[in-house]
């Protein structure tokens, strides 16, 4: 055993390796990304790890290996589960042989997501067990229990860490021992094919099985009652349990508590034992009132005279994260305690700093080129999920819609049919193109829509930490693979006009967009320029103040963080500049020039 300071995501990966996982597949998405990256970095030598093309592919790859008896793990964030839900719902009926854990990192806040989506609902919806760790330490131990439960019942298991568990750090005793799992291999059996009659029988089996798992969970170390005084009780789970414990310590109170680490199937017997003798219960949880509804149902089912308070009653926030302070306030109100209000110290007002594209980001040049090309014409710009979502900000203002990954292409098609006279553009990144954009382009070509596809190819999955994808020629196992060419894919689909151009060559970029937009049908412009975070910067730029006329065009039209006003003249902040040259091309008087390269 060796004690290590690890992030929660690292703890999950190390716990899975300890449990004998043989395959890890996933798609990058904050807050889950580091789980797979840690599995690759800590690979003991016999572990296969891949960034799959999307979450659906990842889950199906893992399911295939689990059919053969291998322990497998899939990683994604909460919105990724929507992509993987098709195979997951069927896999719940088909089952697995090797232990299979689907790690879905939820993002209360949301901090880096489109939605506050609670995976515990997916557990009850798909009728799959779910584990909800409350700390990195618990996640390390709990992931092994999830694999064991999966194999014992032949079912996939969901594992739901939230952002504050994923990204918290803790000192954990990491075992050097690894469970040895020898896959039996695939045994042909009709049960691996999903057919209506078999699905019906399997559904009956699941409904019989889940109460049994719920009873097992009533004796699980991850669910427990903390004895306390009085007729008031507290129920919590996940990271909110940690907040609850700290809040109770600050208030110096010790009511009876129920900690729930496996929300579904609900540990009914343990909950009934907890409720016995209580008058009122406060439920502290993120995000939705999942535990609260279970308790309300139990009280009604068993005619218990217990009042349940929480989100449904307005006693806990209905959106966003919990904090120690918010839980402390809720507990004090529930327990009838008065909090000594201390005036908050006076703090200076901080400037509003919305997220922006990095200085030197090629996406800024791409958006600007399209904007210039379509000046004076009515156009709609459909965006997607990635760094380039920030193209919605002023002064670019180039993202009119953003729904989910890959929807830029298909939303644009619907807009075209509703307003045939308006030119529609769709902006998609290279990684997202492979993940979920290709089918939308096929739909556009097949149904003869009219749109211009803008592929922002910066040769990486930038937003989630620069993971490889099929267009990079690298895999997570370190192998060099054949790059899949986006232009070749588009041409094979049937896109007649496909042009590749460097967006940092402004004149050429504008011309390429104008020519593509003038043609009917589906056309494509691929703006290819590497992400500045993974390339060495070119020689920087500076403003020759004697030439600068103070027109502010470089600031008004680009919004680059590296360009500031120094009095009435523009200036380039050298610590931010990456030498992209866009500002120099925009300056009407040639006042922005490249620094001389140092010898």
Image: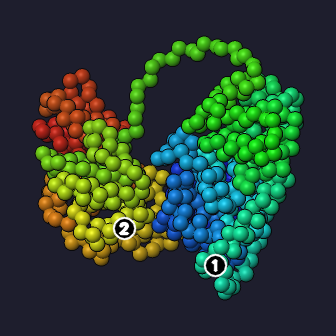
Crowding at label 1, few (<14), some or many (≥20) Cα neighbours within 10 Å? Answer: few
Q: Position of residue 549 (x, y in %)?
A: 14, 29
- Judging depth in this view, the residue of 592 and 555 nearest the camera is 555
Q: Give the position of the N terminus as an image quadrant.
A: bottom right
- Judging depth in this view, the residue of 76 and 413 nearest the camera is 413
Residue under pointer 1? 197
- State the SS at label 2: helix
Residue under pointer 2? 438
Q: How many marks?
A: 2
Q: Position of residue 520 (x, y in %)?
A: 16, 65
Q: Identify which residue is drawn at 33% across, 56% down.
A: 411
Q: Identify which residue is drawn at 51% across, 17% down.
A: 347
* Numbered label attached to residue 555: none
Res 421 quadrant in image: bottom left
Q: Identify which residue is drawn at 84% across, 48% down.
A: 270
- Judging depth in this view, the residue of 421 and 521 nearest the camera is 421
Res 482 quadrant in image: bottom left
Q: Identify which residue is drawn at 23% across, 31% down.
A: 570
Residue 233 in view (yes/no): no
Q: Position of residue 229 (x, y in %)?
A: 88, 29
Most extreme residue toward the bottom, as rendered?
A: 188
Q: Position of residue 473 (x, y in %)?
A: 42, 70
In the displayed structure, would residue 6 be above or below residue 213?
A: above
Crowding at label 2, few (<14), some or many (≥20) Cα neighbours within 10 Å? Answer: some
Res 148 quadrant in image: bottom right
- Residue 407 horizontal side relative to residue 243, left or right: left
Residue 556 in view (yes/no): yes
In the displayed structure, would residue 341 be above or below residue 266?
A: above
What is the distance, in whole Å, between disc 2 and disc 1 at their CAs?
34 Å
- Judging depth in this view, the residue of 492 and 402 nearest the camera is 402
Q: Nearer the viewer, mark 2 or mark 1?
A: 1
């Amino acid at each position: 055993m060796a004690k290590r300071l690890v992030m929660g995501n690292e703890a999950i990966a190390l716990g899975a390796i300890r449990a004998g996982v043989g395959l890890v597949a996933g798609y990058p998405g904050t807050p889950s990304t580091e789980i797979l990256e840690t599995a690759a970095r800590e690979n003991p030598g016999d572990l296969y790890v891949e960034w799959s093309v999307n979450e659906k592919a990842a889950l199906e790859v893992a399911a295939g290996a689990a059919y053969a008896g291998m322990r497998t793990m899939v990683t994604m964030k909460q919105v990724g589960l929507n992509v993987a839900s098709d195979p997951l719902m069927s896999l719940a009926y088909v089952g697995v042989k090797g232990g299979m854990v689907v790690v879905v990192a939820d993002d209360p806040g949301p901090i880096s997501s489109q939605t506050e989506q609670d995976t515990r609902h997916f557990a009850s919806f798909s009728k799959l067990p779910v584990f909800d760790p409350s700390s990195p330490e618990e996640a390390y131990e709990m992931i092994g229990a999830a694999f064991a439960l999966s194999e014992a019942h032949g079912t996939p298991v969901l594992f739901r860490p939230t952002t504050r568990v994923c990204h918290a750090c803790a000192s954990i005793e990491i075992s050097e021992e690894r469970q040895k799992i020898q896959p039996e291999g695939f045994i042909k059996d009709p049960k691996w094919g999903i057919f209506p009659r078999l699905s019906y029988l399997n559904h009956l089996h699941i409904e019989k099985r889940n109460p049994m798992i719920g009873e097992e969970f009533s004796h699980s170390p991850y669910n427990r009652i903390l004895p306390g005084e009085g007729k008031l009780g507290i129920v919590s789970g996940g990271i909110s349990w940690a907040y609850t414990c700290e809040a109770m310590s600050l208030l110096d109170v010790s009511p009876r508590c129920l900690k729930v680490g496996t929300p579904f199937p609900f540990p009914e017997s343990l909950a009934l034992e907890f409720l016995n003798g209580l008058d009122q219960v406060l439920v502290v949880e993120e995000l939705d009132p999942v535990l609260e509804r279970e308790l309300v149902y139990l009280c009604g089912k068993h005619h218990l005279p217990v009042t349940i308070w929480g989100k449904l009653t307005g006693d806990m926030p209905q959106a966003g994260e919990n904090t120690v302070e918010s839980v402390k306030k809720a507990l004090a109100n529930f327990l009838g305690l008065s909090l000594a209000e201390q005036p908050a110290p006076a703090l200076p007002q901080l400037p509003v700093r919305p997220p922006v594209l990095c200085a030197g980001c090629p996406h800024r040049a791409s958006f600007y080129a399209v904007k210039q090309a379509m000046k004076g014409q009515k156009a709609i710009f459909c965006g997607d999920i990635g760094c380039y979502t920030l193209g919605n900000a002023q002064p670019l203002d180039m993202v009119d819609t953003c729904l989910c990954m890959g929807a830029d292409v298909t939303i644009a098609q619907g807009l075209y049919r509703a307003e045939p006279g308006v030119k529609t553009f769709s902006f998609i990144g290279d990684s997202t193109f492979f993940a979920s954009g290709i089918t939308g382009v096929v739909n556009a070509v097949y149904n003869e829509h009219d749109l211009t596809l803008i592929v922002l190819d910066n040769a990486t999955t930038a937003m989630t930490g620069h993971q490889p994808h099929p267009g990079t020629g690298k895999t997570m196992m370190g192998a060099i693979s054949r790059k899949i060419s986006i232009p070749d894919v588009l041409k094979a689909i049937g896109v007649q006009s496909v042009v590749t151009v460097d967006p940092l060559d402004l004149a050429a970029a504008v011309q390429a967009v104008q020519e593509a937009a003038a043609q009917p049908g589906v056309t494509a412009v691929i703006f290819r320029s590497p992400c500045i975070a993974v390339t060495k910067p070119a020689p920087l730029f500076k403003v020759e103040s004697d030439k600068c006329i103070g027109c502010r065009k470089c600031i008004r039209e680009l919004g680059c963080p590296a360009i500031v006003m120094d009095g009435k003249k523009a200036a380039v902040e050298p610590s931010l500049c990456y030498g992209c040259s866009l500002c120099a091309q925009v300056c009407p008087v040639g006042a922005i020039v490249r620094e001389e390269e140092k010898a």
